[in-house]
Image: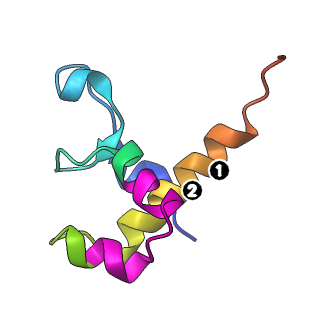
């Protein structure tokens, strides 16, 4: 099981605190956008040299956690 906190960080002094892959300037929102556009994990890995499957899985786990947050609309 991938735990997103092992691969994703947010620091106010880097990219104004946007969640990103640790050790990079690649925002989680960008990678989730690739998934939403229908790109496969293999296609995303080919586009972003140096990323790995665990990091991409962490993005999906992060999104799942956010989706579980309950907000009254």
Residue at mark 2: 61
**Mark 2 touching mark 1, by CB under 8 A?**
yes
Residue at position x 17%, y 50% in the image = 23
39, above or below 34, in the image: below
Q: Dot 2 lies on which element?
A: helix
Q: Few, some or many C-alpha atoms within 10 Å of disc 2 (few <14, some 14-19, many ≥20)? A: some
Front residue of 9/70: it is 70
58, above or below 54, in the image: above
Quadrant location of the C terminus?
A: top right
| Image position, residue 66 (x, y; %) | 63, 38
Residue at mark 1: 64
Horizontal side, residue 3 vs residue 67: left or right: left
| Image position, residue 7 (x, y; %) | 36, 55
Quadrant location of the N terminus?
A: bottom right
> Magenta span: helix, strand or loop, mainly?
helix
Tell me which segment is drawn in magenta.
31-45
Q: Few, some or many C-alpha atoms within 10 Å of disc 1 (few <14, some 14-19, many ≥20)? A: few
| Image position, residue 63 (x, y; %) | 57, 48
Front residue of 23/36: it is 36
Residue 44, which numbered label? none
Does 26 lie within the magenta span? no
Front residue of 52/43: it is 43
Horizontal side, residue 61 vs residue 22: left or right: right
Question: How far apart in space, not on screen, are marks 2 and 1 (Cα)?
Answer: 5 Å
Horizontal side, residue 50 vs residue 17: left or right: left
| Image position, residue 16 (x, y; %) | 24, 21
């Amino acid at each position: 099981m991938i735990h997103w906190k092992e691969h994703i960080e947010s620091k106010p002094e880097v990219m104004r605190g946007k969640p990103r892959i640790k050790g990079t300037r690649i925002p989680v929102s960008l990678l989730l956008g690739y998934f939403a556009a229908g790109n496969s994990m293999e296609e995303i890995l080919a586009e972003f040299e140096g990323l790995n499957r665990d990091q991409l899985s962490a993005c999906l786990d992060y999104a799942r956690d956010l989706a579980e947050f309950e907000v009254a609309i």
